[in-house]
Amino acid sequence: MTQRIWSALRTATVKDTGVVFVGNTISSILGAVFYFLLARIAGPAQFGVFAVVAAVATTAVDLFDVGINAAVINYASRLETRSSSLRSALTRKIWISAVITLIIILAAPIISGLLGQPVLTDAIRWAAILVPTKALFSFVRSGLQAVKLFVLDAVLDILSSVVRLGLFCVFIFGFSFNPVMAAIWGYAIGLFLPAVVATKKIWRMMGKLGNNNANASGFTSYQSYMTAAFGLSAISGRLDVFFLTRLTTLEAVGLYQAAFRLFMPVQQLSSSLSRVLAPRFGGFGDKGEAKKYLNKSLLMSAGLAILMFLTLPFLPWGIKFLYGSDFTAAAGNAFWLLGYFAVFLAATPWWAKLLYFHSNARGYAVLAGGQLIMLLILMPILINVFRSNGAAMALLGVNFIAAGAAAYLVRK
């Protein structure tokens, strides 16, 4: 067993994951400071307002954006389809994000009404700026990940967090902005500026605009399934915030999000691992080689997930220390969310193999639809019984089932 662990640790996967994770760790620390500072300045209710409007905007962009990014990573990792896939992705992102942004601005009163919080209308309109900026930022990063430029990718991630935190402080302490508005604009500009920095590199990868020498065969079909799958996943991933907003209070949303934000480093680690695994699984042509690689990556992800439980005794203290005494009630949420994120991290290699070795975007879409249906049924029931803890319980149970299904689909 020791030899197997040592062999896994010596792989290029771990080295690249290390580069990405270091960058993500620094970015996560800066991001955590941003959220801790926002929570302390705004309080639970206003923190809840930001959490809800950010969830609305990020859900809207994820409906189309994540699927396109996954297709870019899959097709731009191959030289013969790199140029055309990047061009196609950028064109789609520009016009779709413009349409979605306009819809959010016009439909803000309807959205806030559906959430049972009309007070959110103006904040939702302002948060619409996150749609085009997030789409552009993720396009640049997915292009860099496709060609394994993980160092530059990590630098952009860090720069984004630095700009977001710095501008938030300037807006709050220099111009006395409302905390929610300061957070929205700091977030948006923090996405836009790093994307501009890397534009020249991505433009070179796209080649000359008149050159159509490489058609990304299957790009549209693959991206369509991925968009459907990740769109469903985006909705599933925000149902906790939406149901809590509708069925409880903005203060309860703020407390829940405070607990959720504690585990952002875990989400970042899973994202780092996935970005490293994706082009490798996409490049394998042999089932035996892919299976051997899967076993090594599972050994690493499961080990990291188990280590998470060492933080269990320190969660109540950590919440009070980081957020202040107004957020101590978030500890109960944190206990359940710890289990959810542990399963989330451990299952990362299964999802990567399903999407990038098997290219089974259709299977992923079916699983995402199943998750959404289960959450739509379970979450309101559990929230009504267990309040905010019920949202975390639903996430844990459904994610455990989905991880098992993914493992079954990639068994061969």
Image (cartoon, rainbow, N blue to C red):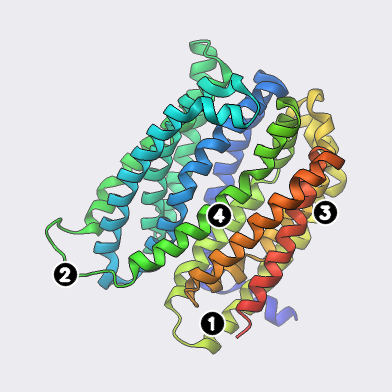
Which residue type carries mark 1?
Ala
What amino acid type should be assigned to the residue bearing mark 3?
Answer: Leu
Q: Where is residue 168 in the image (x, y as percent from the top left)?
A: 52, 23
Who comes first in sequence, dot 3 or dot 2? 2
Q: Which residue is located at x 45 percent, y 81 percent?
A: 284
- Disc 4, SS: helix
- Say left or right for 369 vs 257: left
Q: What residue type is labelled 4?
A: Leu
Mark 1 or 2, nearer chain start? 2
Who is closer to the viewer here, 218 or 262?
A: 218
Quarter in which the N terminus is drawn: bottom right
Question: If you read the primary sequence from the N terminus, does the residue marked by circle 4 or circle 2 appear first?
Answer: 2
Residue 77 in the image: state x and y as whole percent.
36, 68
Q: Mark 2 points at which residue?
A: 213
| Of the image marks 1 and 4, the number of the one nearer the N terminus | 4
Q: Distance between the residues labelled 3 and 2?
A: 53 Å
Q: Residue at x 57, y 66 (%)?
A: 366
> Residue sitting at 66 percent across and 29 percent down?
36
